[in-house]
Amino acid sequence: MLSRVAENLFWMSRHIERADNLARLVTAHQSELLDATSAPSEERHKWHPLLEVTQMGDENSKEGVVSYMVSSEKNPDSVVNCVFHGRENARAVRDQISEEMWLELNALWLNLKAIRPTQRNRHDKICELVVQSSMKFRGIINTSLPRTDVWAFVQLGEYLERADKTSRIVDLPHFLPKNEAKSAWNTMLRASSATAEHRQRFKGEVNATSVSTLLLFSTTFPRSVRFGVNRVSELLHTISGTRQGDYLNEAERAAGALLARLNYSAVEETTEMGLHEYIDSIQVDLNGIGFALGQRYFLLRKEAPETNAENYVTSRMQAQVRMQQQQEEEQQQQQ
Amino acid sequence: MDQFGDYKTEGFFDEAVEEEPNTMRSGYLETAKFFAQLTDQRMRASIRSLERTFLKAGVTFTVYSDGQGTERIFPFDPFPRIIPANEWDVIDRGLRQRIKALNMFLTDVYSERAILKDGIVPAELIKTSKHNRAEFAGLKVPHDTYIHICGTDLIRDDQGTYCVLEDNGRCPSGVSYMLENRLAMKRTFPELYRDMRVEPVRNYPKELLKMLNSVAPHQKDNSVCVVLTPGQYNSAYFEHTFLAQQMGIEIVEGRDLTVDNERVYMHTTQGLVQVDVIYRRIDDEYLDPHFFKRDSILGVPDLMKAYRAGNVMLVNAVGTGVADDKATYSYVPDMIRYYLSEEPILPNIETFLGSREDDLKYMLENIDKIVIKAVDEAGGYGMLIGPASTKAEQEDFRAKVKANPRGFIGQPVISLSRHPTFCNGKLEGRHIDLRPYVLTGSETVVVPGGLTRVALKKGSLVVNSSQGGGSKDTWVLRGKDSKDQPS
């Protein structure tokens, strides 16, 4: 498979997963706010923790935090922008994915575009569409995509992003005033579709330990961090043909190391180290896996290797702009 | 419904209706009847369903006026253009004759130069052609084929004679619309399609792949062929992926390829894989930054070294632009006579060359009455339609032509034939052209059909999609002796 194709498959999947997770988080938080007793004037303040936990920066513009997270064109990681980028990635590899996958993403994009800026509850509508369509998209992948490397890179994007986002969601209480932490646990469970699973396992007692146990360390719950990292490690080994436990490249090593940490961590470790600090360290490791994966499979020979992940992203974006300009220039010759 | 109600040909050659007496031409009677018996409601529903099909499938071109790009569907008219078998036979033979002469001309120009020495085509004209690639003279290409894919633009004059307007021998586009239009028509009006016995076009991708394989440098069983695209911001990107997908081959960008030891490789997750044939949808100048345009990031450094060494074949070959220079165009009938000792089956449009003194004088004196075209531009750029232009535009072109006579040609304004087209639920005449596709590797294949472009604006002669053009499906009817097979 072409390196560029692998990169687009990975990012298609990752962008859709990112949009999905953010939409879930916004919806869950919204629902908790409805039960809160505070005055509407504090609403903006109430949304800020979400900005921090998703690392979207500080947004104080008039359009408001929800709009910034969901539909803003200025925010590269807004729900709508993620869908846009995911669809662009899909378009770049239309010949590699199943027809139904493309039709679903294209339909989602057209449906989002059709929502008028003035429509009431427009952000609820967007989030609902994205979550529904993302589930459908995963179902289509499951039933229509052959289990080749195409599938493996699609799955990698999904599980790496989900592990990252779930870990961020668990970090939410850190950004809230102490007395509100309890309502955050409900948000976390709801955003991760984990309410029912949690109820069954912990009989209704919601606290930091129970939520962390489920969302960070569960081996059976498909949105937990450990579940995701396990899948990432398996997929990396499938692609290279290496046995689990061995490693052939840095991505496999990093995934194996993080998996071992999660496998042998007890939930007590998170309280000793501090939950926020523990999650921070997991996120550093997840970024490391993503970076090593890009170095091994996506980086094209002609481009100079970059020393860190951030430079890499910036230089790719600049290259993209130059590419776009020249393609438009060349087009003048078109017959 | 009676869409033909007060249909008028208004003195133009009409594809469907003969003016005197006011009757339907061959092949159109059944189709007109079919549309007449459809209710308004079914017709509107059909048009909506056609448009939705195109939009959902992403058969679009992109206009980048805002950051995220607006996708438009290429407007589609459901009334098919119908070409009877006997008419198509003439077109088919004419296209084969023409492509044969063009390839012999290119082989000659890049080797013996006999046609220049014999004074049939002026050597000066070739020397000064922008797309002349003298550096590649003497390079032997498989089967002496330079133009593997040709998208000849045909128009019909006021007598209904098919004439060649342009040869488009560099990177002609639009073939995906021919295929998608057909799929959409078959889905929407299956009963009409079946009754009309239409020649299928669906073999095009198969024939294209067969042709690509036939020009692979070192003939082997499994040559690696790829489609080289400028990238997803190109307005024809949908077509590039569509063709790659239909052929089951990789679509690559310049940055996916690398040249090592005069061989071309693509960069895959499992390492480097050698590439034998590149169907490139990039113009010559952008192919290799070490050879042509230095700042090209769409191309592949040293690609020309591998090409010259004969380790990779480019489709179309490098340097075909010298044959589709609009000044060279005027010599194609002479080429046919020179190389084939035949008379041209499809005539040219009368053409005045700025490089000929008398012609230049005529062009400058009649600039308000004729069409002036730059010889090396495409896609409707660098063109002046005299009668439809302002005094200022005429003066601008007059100065340009005077400064560079070799760079311009003049042609009379041809009133393209018209075709019934749905305009607000009624049929009106609109101007059309026809682009059939000709494939040549070891042999020539002409796909029975093509892209019919239609100028949707009333009175407009410009069929380009950027200027209000749309398309129709093109139905070549099967002859009496052709096998009646389902398609």
Image (spheres, coloured by chain):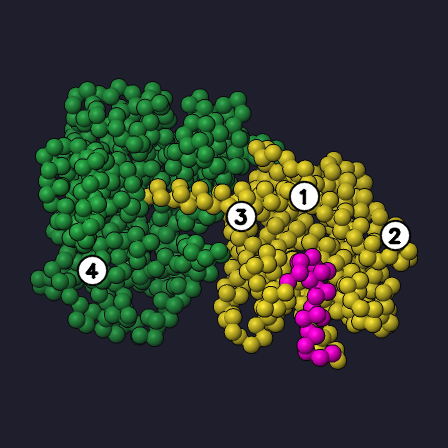
Chain colours: A yellow, B green
Chain of the residue displaying label 3: A
Of tags 3 and 4, the one toward the viewer is 4
3D distance between C-alphas at marks 3 and 4: 41 Å
Asked if the residues shown at circle 2 and circle 3 are in contact, with their CB atoms under 8 angstroms apart, the answer is no
Quadrant of the image occupied by residue A309: top right
Mark 4 residue type: Gly
Badge 4 and badge 1 both on one subunit: no
Of tags 4 and 1, the one toward the viewer is 1
The crowding category of the residue bearing disc 3, from other C-alpha atoms within 10 Å (few below 14, some 14 to 19, many at least 20), is many
Chain of the residue displaying label 4: B
Residue at 35% from the left image edge and 23% from the top image edge:
B135
Q: Secondary structure at mark 4?
A: loop
Q: Which mark is residue A265?
A: 2
Q: Is residue B356 above or below residue B346?
A: above
Asked if the residues shown at circle 4 and circle 2 are in contact, with their CB atoms under 8 angstroms apart, the answer is no
Magenta residues (range): A38-59
For mark 4, what is the residue?
B459
Residue at 70% from the left image edge and 74% from the top image edge:
A42
Q: Which mark is residue A93?
A: 3
The crowding category of the residue bearing disc 2, from other C-alpha atoms within 10 Å (few below 14, some 14 to 19, many at least 20), is few
3D distance between C-alphas at marks 1 and 2: 27 Å
Magenta stretch contains residue B270: no
Mark 2 residue type: Ser
Q: Secondary structure at mark 3?
A: loop
Mark 1 residue type: Ala
Magenta stretch contains residue A45: yes
Of tags 2 and 3, the one toward the viewer is 2
Residue B484 appears in view:
no
Chain of the residue displaying label 1: A
For mark 1, what is the residue?
A309
Quadrant of the image occupied by residue B441: top left
